[in-house]
Image (tube, rainbow, N blue to C red):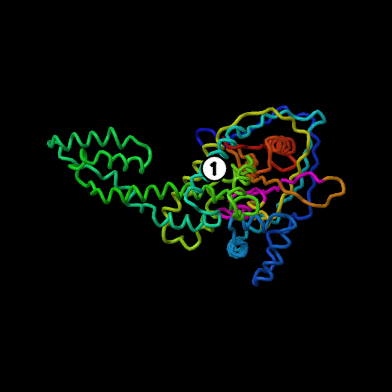
Amino acid sequence: MVDKKGKVKSFSIIALGFIIFLLETISLAGTGHKLPPLETDSQKLAFLLEVKDHVPALFSDAARYDIDLFTLLDNEKELVEKLKSKPEYERLFTSKQYHDLTITPPQRGISVGAVVINPESVDAWKKSLTDQTNLIQQESLQPSQLIDHAKILLRKSPEPHDQELIGKLGKIDKKNSKQLKSQDTLNKSCLKLTTQLERWQCVRDHFEELKVLPNLPNKERIEALISSFQAEQKLHSTLSVISILKGTLDGLIPHTWQEVHQRINQLTPDDLIHLSDIDALNPITYKALEGEHGLKNPIINKAIQSVQKQGHAYASQTVTNQTKVTTPVKLSQVLPQVGIFRGCTGGDCSSQYSFPYPNDPHERIFFIEEPQTPGSTEKKLKGYVSATEVTLTNGEKGLYVITISGSHVSPGNAELILRGLEKEKEKLDVKHIILPN
């Protein structure tokens, strides 16, 4: 853990039980940090096909999260060339060890309190999406018209300066009793309302009382503002529906509203988690609104945040269930040039926004694998563990576990991983396993 003074303290895991633990040091140790030739597109593609052996969902998840794999390799190559000019960098990688770890719970299993999204919350989320879909249907649109409709609403939405306009009403003369009374009406009747649309509708309804206020737009301008905020409200609902259609299953827009409703009914808690992630919504929305990037960036960003906020409100409603962990988990430590693609195993934004970290010689990336069924050779990844070696205030080494990520990583998997790392910390050449607060 990290104490209030910022000093790293060790985390002790108790009641390890009779965990069966296998640790294998594999032959990648002592090779340093070497990249294959990556000058041409064919060389890059050949390397990516090798990476796909380690990351089966590499290409599908890269497309889903809008990751340009060739650009990622260009950035990796440029970074490594700069780092290798430092003699200490290559020396640290030459001495680095890589491990495969298989952690098996005791025969009786391990009881774990699993925090999951409340099923009622998932149902409420799906009902909300159905209600929004029904409102869109009233516009006499077909599903195939959703994206074009969103673009039209985007152009009708209020500009950033319109968002700020209501805050500029006033600057009254405090000696003017009519202005004082009008300001009081504005504060008590309109500014207490939640949305800009509601506030401007209130201003319109109280126009005769408020017309003495400085900076108050005329009636025509107020009606135009109300219309633009109504368009913004419809845009947010439309993008909510687009996000669930483009961000789940095959990412295609169905032909009929009946199919849209069927798609909504099939949504799972994993979909809710995925669509509550701003970094997942960004590529979905920008791809859907292709051609509108530069024109309305702040408005698109606000719309994405609105969709994310709505999803997060449902995803944050959780319950705790007691479950028993009986299946093993396998960790495979990977080379940096494979670890930079970790986001394509965990279903997160790490490859898109923070790919370089595995190039730190102290960083350790483990891929979390599904146990293989007898006779199967197919590798299935559940996610990844990101950790880094740190030096404690007493000079001892610790392994600081930064992230256990993956939409298919259960609380039981996480519990086993932490117990396994704690039990075998000496073989991993550290004295302590450390967690953030």
Q: What element carries label 1?
A: helix
Q: Disc 1 marks which residue?
A: 129
Left or right of 306 in this view: 60: right
Residue at the left extreme, as displayed: 175
Along the line of sight, the residue nearer the viewer: 186 or 160: 186
Q: What stretch is highlighted in magenta?
A: 345-372
Residue 352 appears in the picture as rendered: yes
Q: Where is residue 273 in the image (x, y as percent from the top left)?
A: 59, 42
Quadrant (top left/top right/bottom left/bottom right) for the N terminus: top right
- Picture quadrant where residue 156 is located: bottom left
The residue positioned 25% from the left and 48% from the top of the image is 219
Most distant residue in the right direction: 375
* Depicted 350 relative to depicted 422: above or below: below
Per the image, is 364 magenta? yes
Number of disc labels:
1
Residue 50 image point, x, y percent: 73, 61
**x, y percent for residue 197:** 36, 43
For residue 388, say whether it is visible: no
Q: Nearer the viewer, residue 362 or 150?
A: 150
In the picture provided, is 213 more to the left or to the right than 39? left
Q: What residue type is labelled 1?
A: Leu
Q: Residue at x 63, y 45 (%)?
A: 262
Q: In which quarter of the image is the C terminus?
A: top right
Label 1 environment density (alpha carbons within 10 Å; few <14, some 14–19, many ≥20)? many
Q: Where is residue 260 in the image (x, y as percent from the top left)?
A: 59, 48
- Using the image as rendered, state which of residue 415 and residue 189 is in the foreground: 189
Residue 253: quarter of image: bottom right
Magenta stretch holds residue 281: no
Q: What residue sits 55% from the left and 42% below the top?
A: 130
